[in-house]
Amino acid sequence: NAGVTQTPKFQVLKTGQSMTLQCAQDMNHEYMSWYRQDPGMGLRLIHYSVGAGITDQGEVPNGYNVSRSTTEDFPLRLLSAAPSQTSVYFCASSRDTSRHGYTFGSGTRLTVV
Amino acid sequence: KQEVTQIPAALSVPEGENLVLNCSFTDSAIYNLQWFRQDPGKGLTSLLLIQSSQREQTSGRLNASLDKSSGRSTLYIAASQPGDSATYLCAVPLSRLTFGEGTQLTVNP
């Protein structure tokens, strides 16, 4: 049982490049979400999804796109990378938004130069 | 809007000491509260999930309590070890998961 799998673990991008951070879970969780973690800012919600075909914005959605075509996968797309997007990104899943515990992936450390 | 506060922000103790980490939240309409551990440069590991119907939840040397009416939770670590050194985060799900800022724990040999 793999839980939540994030790839890649590390990535360096040049300003203006685009890329997709992958997140997959094998627990049949309906709820999936993306967070970024920055020193002094804690964990901030970027986007979330309550099921396949449904996505919504979190606290800091600008510069990021998501889609949810399957229950298992929730990729995060950086459209045109900026140095301000240098961060550690975590994907999390749960059976729902509030009644069950959350499982987190191991993170993607992204540097934009 | 749910706000979560953790006290203290940092804690340094000698090995073997029992310690308490505190978490408070403003909206008590919650179903559960989750404690996580994060090692430097690593992801979040779930330690304990305590349901609102429970008063306490235990796992090994860890014990978490939850008092919804007062908006407080505590994480008790017994007989601390250097391997317990990490940042401990509490998180409360409502419409979204809201985290505290964390307590950075250092256990000195």
Image (cartoon, rainbow, N blue to C red):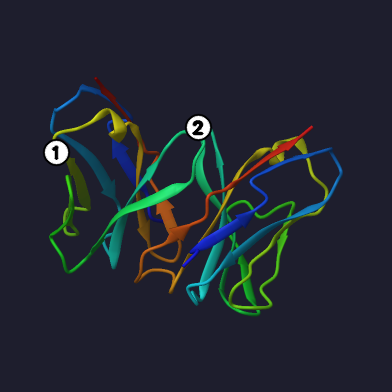
* Labelled disc at residue A40: 2
Chain under disc 1 = B
Q: Position of residue A103 (x, y in %)?
A: 44, 60
Q: Is residue A78 above or below residue B13?
A: below
Q: Secondary structure at mark 2?
A: loop
Q: Position of residue A108 (x, y in %)?
A: 62, 46
If the image is split into quadrants, where does the N terminus of chain B sit? bottom left
Chain under disc 2 = A
Instruction: Tell me the amino acid under the disc marked 1.
Output: Ala
If the image is split into quadrants, where does the C terminus of chain B sit? top left
Crowd class of label 2 (few under 14; some 14 to 19; many from 20; radius 10 Å): few
Which quarter of the picture shows residue B17?
top left
Q: Position of residue A112 (x, y in %)?
A: 76, 36
Q: Which residue is farthest front?
A: A1
Judging depth in this view, the residue of A9 and A110 nearest the camera is A9
Q: Is residue B85 above or below residue B64?
A: above
- Horizontal side of residue B39 vs A30, given as left or right: left
As measured in the structure, the alpha-carbon distance from the residue carrying label 1 to the one carrying label 2 is 29 Å
Which mark lies nearer to you, 1 or 2? 1
* Labelled disc at residue A44: none
Judging depth in this view, the residue of B32 and A91 nearest the camera is A91
Which quarter of the picture shows residue B97?
bottom left
Q: Secondary structure at mark 1?
A: loop
- Horizontal side of residue A79 vs B45, given as left or right: right
